[in-house]
């Protein structure tokens, strides 16, 4: 879907932005910006959209996103019900590639940094001991001032540039540079409606009516914007929720199947294998073996 441009607020006294957020949820707007972003989810659960990837997120996840890579973190419905016991918490850093000066990236000593920024165009999930080191650096950066802020940012970039403890999020580099307000409104309606109603049957008549388009026009439009059919998008949403339910290991697979909007078990197994490359049982075993 077509993302919305987001203007990252940065103080005139700062070369980059760092926030420690505590809020009911992460919002719902699918967006992009020219700044790279580090997001460390301290508390929160839901489904994240990064480029063409749809996956679950949970507390402790840390990612680095490249410039203009579309993304959003959509919390589970319980975070939108004014429940004081349900809050998200995150540390977020936004910085432009040349925030340390236009000549910085040309320095021979900084040759790993442009390579890091290229890898970040696919999105990076930070893992292992690197994530632990980053945890300490990010908390140190929150209250740092003046030159200390710059030193910590350099240490963060050094840590990320030198590590192999990461996993790419998207299959290829993806970025966005322009946006249409009409498309933003239309596709965000489709996006939010699908996330709120994925458990029930959503017909093309229903979703195209929401977009004020005929079924044929909607199908053509959605495919041109997202490079996938609406039903492929809907199935990915359902499978992402099924993956989370399997990991929680509280319900039988057959119950998860119907709870996520599939109307028969064989159909669920077929789509699950197509999206994840494995059966629900194999997926559960793979995750539980890592615990």
Image (cartoon, helix red, strand yellow):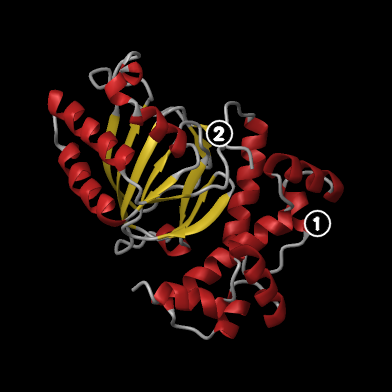
- Determine which residue is flagged by label 2: 175
Quarter where residue 290 is shown? bottom left
Tell me which residue sits at (46%, 61%) in the image: 76
Q: Earlier in the sequence, mark 1 or mark 2?
A: 2
* Rendered location of residue 126, percent (x, y): 35, 50
Mark 1 → mark 2, Cα distance in angstroms = 31 Å
* Rendered location of residue 153, percent (x, y): 24, 32
- The secondary element bearing badge 2 is classed as loop
Mark 1 or 2: in front is 2
Q: Are marks 1 and 2 in contact (CB under 8 Å)?
A: no
* Rendered location of residue 89, percent (x, y): 29, 52
Residue 40 visible in the shown view:
yes
Quarter where residue 254 is shown? bottom right
Residue 267: which numbered mark, if any? none
The image quadrant where one finds the N terminus is: top right
The image quadrant where one finds the C terminus is: bottom left
Q: Is residue 252 above or below residue 73?
A: below
> Left of 23 or right of it: where is 27?
right
Q: Spot the residue most to the front.
A: 108
Tell me which residue sits at (30%, 40%) in the image: 162
Q: Nearer the viewer, residue 247 or 173?
A: 173
Residue 205: which numbered mark, if any? 1
């Amino acid at each position: 879907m077509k993302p919305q441009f987001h203007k990252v607020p940065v103080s005139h006294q700062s070369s980059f932005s760092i926030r420690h957020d505590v809020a009911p949820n992460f919002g719902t707007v699918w967006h992009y910006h020219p700044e790279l972003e580090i997001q460390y989810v301290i508390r929160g659960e839901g489904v994240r959209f990064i480029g063409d990837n749809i996956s679950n997120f949970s507390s402790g996840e840390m990612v680095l996103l490249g410039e203009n890579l579309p993304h959003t973190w959509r919390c589970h419905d319980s975070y939108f019900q004014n429940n004081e016991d349900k809050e998200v918490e995150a540390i977020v850093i936004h910085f432009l590639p040349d925030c340390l000066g236009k000549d910085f990236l040309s320095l021979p000593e900084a040759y790993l940094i442009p390579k890091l920024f290229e890898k970040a165009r696919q999105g990076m999930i930070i893992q292992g001991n690197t994530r632990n080191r980053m945890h300490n650096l990010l908390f140190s950066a929150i209250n740092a001032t003046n030159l200390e802020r710059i030193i910590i940012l350099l240490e963060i970039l050094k840590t990320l540039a030198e590590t192999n403890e990461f996993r790419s999020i998207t299959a290829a580099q993806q970025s966005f540079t322009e946006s249409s307000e009409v498309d933003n409104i239309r596709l965000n309606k489709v996006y939010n409606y699908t996330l709120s109603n994925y458990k029930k049957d959503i017909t093309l008549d229903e979703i195209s009516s929401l977009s004020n388009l005929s079924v044929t026009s909607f199908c053509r439009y959605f495919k041109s914007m997202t490079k996938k059919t609406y039903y492929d998008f809907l199935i990915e949403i359902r499978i992402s929720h099924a993956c989370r339910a399997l990991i929680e290991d509280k319900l039988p697979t057959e119950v998860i199947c119907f709870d996520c909007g599939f109307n028969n078990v064989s159909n669920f197994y077929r789509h699950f294998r197509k999206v994840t490359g494995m059966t629900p049982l194999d997926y559960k075993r793979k995750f539980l073996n890592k615990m």
